[in-house]
Amino acid sequence: MSNEGVKVIEIKKSVFEDNDKEADKLRDELKDRGIFLLNLMSSPGSGKTTTLKQTVNTLKDKYRIGVMEADIDSDVDARTISDCGVHAIQLHTGGMCHLDAGMTKQGLDELTEEEVELAILENVGNLVCPAEFDTGACKNAMILSVPEGDDKPLKYPLMFSIVDVVLINKTDVMPYFDFDMEKCKENIKKRNPNATVIPICAKTGEGIDEWCEWLSKNVDEWRA
């Protein structure tokens, strides 16, 4: 049977193009409103929520902070962050492994009913899908934990290529894993020469001050 006359639609390209337009529109809106949006990504179990708690506790007296917790189900993370004394909402993705700009805007509309200067999106735990969709964030950050290995930047090139900062978490367990910090930094630079790399331990607080200084600098520049 001939396929002549059958219309072929490039779905993926169309979806990405439409999302990119929505993301740019959202960034313009955030700029006008003086809101800085951070998109925080990682694989499950890397320590996103623990790192976020440390971040919120360090910066909550400096900025009005709101947090969006994205997950397939449950409200565990939102409850955890609410206990830190900031406004937090849970975003259920309905089984989807990422958030796009439209979904992020829905969450922001709810979150920013209260005045927020720094909004943080804790994206779905995944190193593939979240990297493909621009959320409209001002900056992208990701966490790589020591147990995941120093070769992750080579295995997930897109994720490492789109982020502005990489937090290498769980440095306290380095003696127990075959993890080479310098090699990991080299692998990250291969994918993204402009990425800032900050070793941290969310459990002990190591490196959190440096991370929060980086974040504060970018928030202040965006809101200037």
Image (spheres, grey):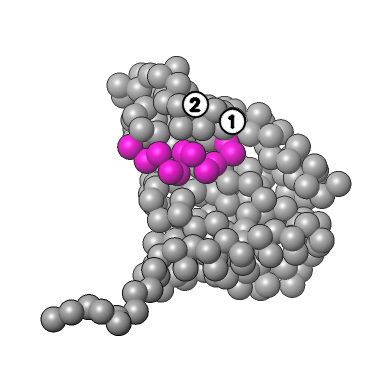
Query: Which type of secondary structure does the marked residue at label 1 adopt?
Result: loop
The span picked out in magenta is 155-165
Residue 189 marker = 2
Q: Give percent across and percent down for residue 36.
A: 72, 53
Asked whether residue 182 appears in the rendered view, the answer is: yes
Contact (Cβ within 8 Å) of mark 2 with mark 1: no
Residue behind mark 1: 194
Residue 48 position, x and y percent, is 49, 46
User: Which quarter of the picture shows residue 154?
Assistant: top left
Q: Is residue 94 left or right of residue 102?
A: left
Let me know if residue 157 is in the magenta part.
yes
Q: Measuring 68% from the left and 65% from the top, which residue is drawn there? A: 25
Where residue 137 appears, as percent x and y from the top left, is 63, 54
- Which picture quadrant has residue 171? top left
Callout 2, which amino acid? Lys
Amino acid bearing label 1 = Asn
Q: Position of residue 111 (x, y in %)?
A: 67, 68
The quarter in which the N terminus is drawn is bottom left
Q: Main secondary structure of the magenta part?
A: helix
Tag 2 secondary structure: helix
